[in-house]
Amino acid sequence: MNDLRPWSNKTPDGSFDYIVIGSGMGGMTCAAMLAKLGKRVLVLEQHYEPGGFTHTFKRRGWRWDVGVHAVGEVSQHTLPGRLLEHLSGGRLRWASLGPVYDEFHWPEGFRIDFPDSPKQFRTNLLDAFPGADAAVDRWLSLSREVSEAMRRYYLARTLPARFGGLADRLIAGSAKRHFERRSADVAGELCADPRLRAVLLSQWGYYGSPPSRSSFAMQALVTRHFAWGGYYPVGGSQQIAHSLLRTVAAAGGWTKIRGDVDEIIVEDDRVVGVRLVERDGDRGQLIPARGVISAAGIWSTINRLLPPDYCDQPWARSILELSPGPAHVCLYLGFEGDIRAAGAGSANKWFYEGWDPEVAAWEVEPGRAPGRAPVLYCSFPSLKDPTHDPGPHQRHTGEVVTFVPWSAFERWRGTRWHHRGPSYEAFKQALGDQLRAQLLERMPGLEPLIVHAELSTPLSTAHFARPYAGSIYGLEPTPERFRNPWLRPRAPIEGLYFAGSEVTTVGVMGAMLGGVLAAVSAEPIAGLRLLRSLERP
C-alpha cells in the first residue's frame, strides 16, 4: 500500500475484525482506537478524499478546510488531547490561535473578545457589562458543572438501551438535567440585559441551534470547551486524516476511498458485513466482518444502509422523527497580499447584524434578491497554520460561513454536482455576492486582495458527506434529541455500532468522543483499560 497516504481505492485481502463506514472525525477516531487495541479495521469512505468535515480541498494553489476552524481541549492537560496524541502516534500537532480565538462584533461598534483564559474571559465580560458579576459567575459555574458531569454521562451512553433509563438516572442524572433545559431559558433566568444574554449565547453557531431550541448543556459545553482557547492542526486540517488513518494502516487495516456502501448486511438480527455499491455492472462486493461501526450519521444509516424493515421499528422511527441541524453556505476566498494588514488574523471573527440570537438562518429564496445575512462567521485558515508558506504572491485563504434553510436548495436535490443548471448557478452567484459585500463592509482592506471566490451550498455538503437535510451538525442538539434513549453507540442490532457526534455532542471533539464511545462499546474491557492508562495520576 501507499507509504505516503494510508488510503487508496483498493480493498486489501484478508479478513477484518471491524468495518467503519465513514471517515469523519468519529469514524477515524473509532478506527484508530480499535487499531490500537490490536484490531484489523477497514474504513470505507464514499468520497475520493477521506476525513469527512476535516478534509480540505485545493484550487489554483489555495487550500481550504471545510469544517475545522477552532478546536479546544487538545493540549496535554486534557484527556481528549492525550488520547489524540496517543491515537495519532504523536504525529498530530496543534497551534494555538493566540490569546484571542474568537472576536465578536455587534452593531454600534460593540466588540468583545473571547480569550484563552477563564480569568480573562470573566474580566472581558465584566468590563463590557459592569455590575453583572452574579449573572456572569453563575453562567461560568453552570458551565463547569455540566463539563464535570459529562464523564458519567458518556459512561452511561455505552450501556445498551435496555439499561439506558436506569443508567441515565443513576449515573448521568446531573448532566441529563442540564440537557433537558433550553439555553434561552437559563440565560433569561440569570440576567435581564438582552445584550449580555446575546453575548453569553453568541457561540451558538458552533452547534447550530438557536437558544430557544438548543439544549443548555450543549451551550455550556461550548463555553467550557474553549475556556483555554482554540487551536488549529499544524499543517492544516488534512493532517487529522493523515495521522489517524496511518495508525489504522500500521495495525494491518486500511482506508478504502470511493468505497460507497450500498447496505449493511443483517442475518438473523445480527450484522455480518456490508455490501458496496454496484460498479460497472458488477454486483457490489460483499465484505464480511464481525462488527460494523457506522459513522455515516444515524439518520442516514437507518434510511439508507439498513434493510427497509428496520426503518419501521420503534427505535428507528423515534430517531427519524428528530429534527436536523442547520444547513450552511460557505464563501471560500483566495487572496494575494498582506491580509493581516487588512485586519485578518488567526482569531475567528463573528459579525452580528443585530442583538437577537434567535435570528439564526439567512432566509434566502431562489428568484429573490437576498437580504442581509444576520451573522457572518469568518475564518482565515492560512493565518492559523504556522507551516503555511504564502510564497512570493502572499497567497492566503479566507472563509465566510452562515446558516441557510435546506428548503431553499431542495428543488435541486438529485441533480449532479457541477451540472445543476443556470438557475442554481444564478442563485449561488447572488448569495456569494451578498456575503462578499457584507464582509467588505466590515473589512474593506481585503477587497483589492481577493483573487478567487467560490460558494459551497448545502447541496455540496449533501454530495460529499450525505448528511440529513444537508446539515453540517447532524441531528439538532435539542432536549428532544438528548432525551432519545436510542442515540447511543450500541445499536439495537447485534454487531452494529454508531460513532460520531450524534451519540455524544456536536462538533469536532463531540464526534471524536462519539468514536471513542463506539470503540469502547465494541471492545469494553480493552477500551476502558486504554482510557484509564491515559488518565493523569
Image: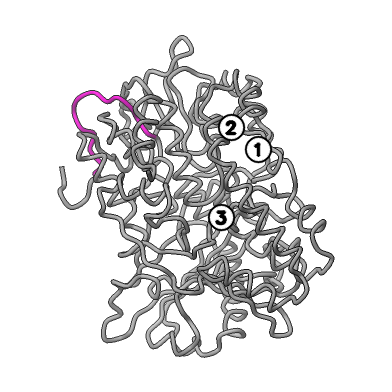
Q: Does the magenta segment cover residue 371? A: no
Name the residue nearer the viewer: 416 or 472: 472
Q: Position of residue 296 (x, y in %)?
A: 47, 38
At label 1, the amino acid type is Phe
At label 2, the amino acid type is Leu
Task: Locate the N terminus by quadrant.
Answer: top left
Q: Earlier in the sequence, mark 2 or mark 3?
A: 3
The quarter holding residue 98 reads bottom left
Dot 1 alpha-carbon crowd within 10 angstroms: few under 14, some 14 to 19, many 20 or more: many
Residue 282, above or below 224: above
In the picture of the structure, the residue carrying the numbered disc 1 is: 482
Residue 341 in sight from this viewpoint: yes
Q: What stretch is highlighted in magenta?
A: 8-20
Label 3: element kind: helix
Q: Position of residue 470 (x, y in %)?
A: 57, 49
At label 3, the amino acid type is Pro
Badge 2 vs badge 1, beta-carbon distance below 8 Å: yes
Residue 46 in sight from this viewpoint: no
In the picture of the structure, the residue carrying the numbered disc 3 is: 458
Alpha carbon of mark 3 to alpha carbon of mark 1: how far? 25 Å
Q: Does the magenta segment cover residue 13? A: yes
Task: Locate the C terminus by quadrant.
Answer: top left
Q: Which of marks 3 and 1 is nearer the N terminus?
A: 3
Q: Which residue is drawn at 59% across and 22% down?
A: 161
Q: Residue at x 75, y 73 (%)?
A: 354
Return the residue found at the far right: 192
- Specify the label residue 487 is tagged with: 2
Dot 3 alpha-carbon crowd within 10 angstroms: few under 14, some 14 to 19, many 20 or more: many
